[in-house]
Image (cartoon, rainbow, N blue to C red):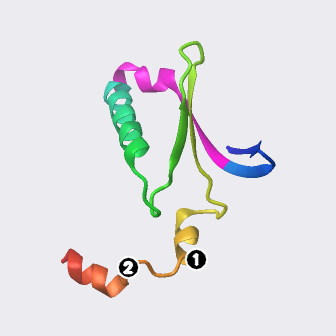
Amino acid sequence: MKVTETIDGIEETFAMKIMQKSKMRSRKQTNKYATTFNEIDIMKKLHHPNIIHLHEIIDDQHDPNMYLLMQFLPKNSIQEFLDDIDNIVDEELLWNWSR
């Protein structure tokens, strides 16, 4: 979901991910619930240009959903976004390094 906020006359667009808590807490998904919160904790700490930034978490105990407010990418996919960026790392160098 796309969300727009205006602060001091500056409009900023965010992506909002809505997660149903009941689905994360079901018996089959117990591990998913813990994993999700571990990933959120990691995302809060990471600040890198190649990683989508997590701005805010809205988790009201009376709401059945949890909301993640994240950096909005205006392209249709992450690949399109990456294709528009100058080569950050030379692909050949990356392949040689990963072998």
The foreground one among 78 and 47 is 47
Question: Does residue 25 show up magenta in the picture?
Answer: yes
* Residue 20 as seen in the image, left or right of residue 90: right
> In the rendered image, which residue does mark 2 sit on?
89
Q: Residue at x 70, y 50 (%)?
A: 13
Q: Quadrant of residue 4?
A: top right
Image-quadrant location for residue 44: top left
Q: Position of residue 37 (x, y in %)?
A: 38, 32
Please state the horizontal and vertical placement of residue 89, each as a whole percent of the image: 38, 79
The relative height of residue 14 versus residue 48 in the rendered view (above or below) is: above
- Could you say whether the residue bearing mark 2 is in a helix, strand or loop? loop
The answer to whether residue 63 is left or right of residue 7 is left
**Where are the magenta residues, as a range?**
14-28
User: Which numbered disc covers residue 84?
Assistant: 1
Task: Indicate the position of residue 51 as horizontal and vertical percent values.
Answer: 45, 57
Extreme-right residue of the structure? 9
Task: Name the kind of residue labelled 1 in the image.
Answer: Asp
Question: Residue sitting at 31 percent across and 29 percent down?
Answer: 31
Looking at marks 1 and 2 on the same chain, the residue that comes earlier in the sequence is marked by 1
Q: Residue furthest bottom?
A: 92
Quarter of the rendering occupied by the N terminus: top right
Indicate the amino acid at tag 2.
Val
Tell which residue pokes out farthest to the front in this image.
8
Badge 1: residue crowd in 10 Å (few <14, some 14–19, many ≥20): few
- Tag 1 near tag 2, CB within 8 Å: no
Identify the residue at image location x=50%, y=23%: 21
Residue 80: within the magenta? no
In which image quadrant can residue 25 be found? top left
Left or right side of 22 for 34: left
Place of residue 86 in the rendered image (x, y in percent of width and height, measured from the top left): 51, 81
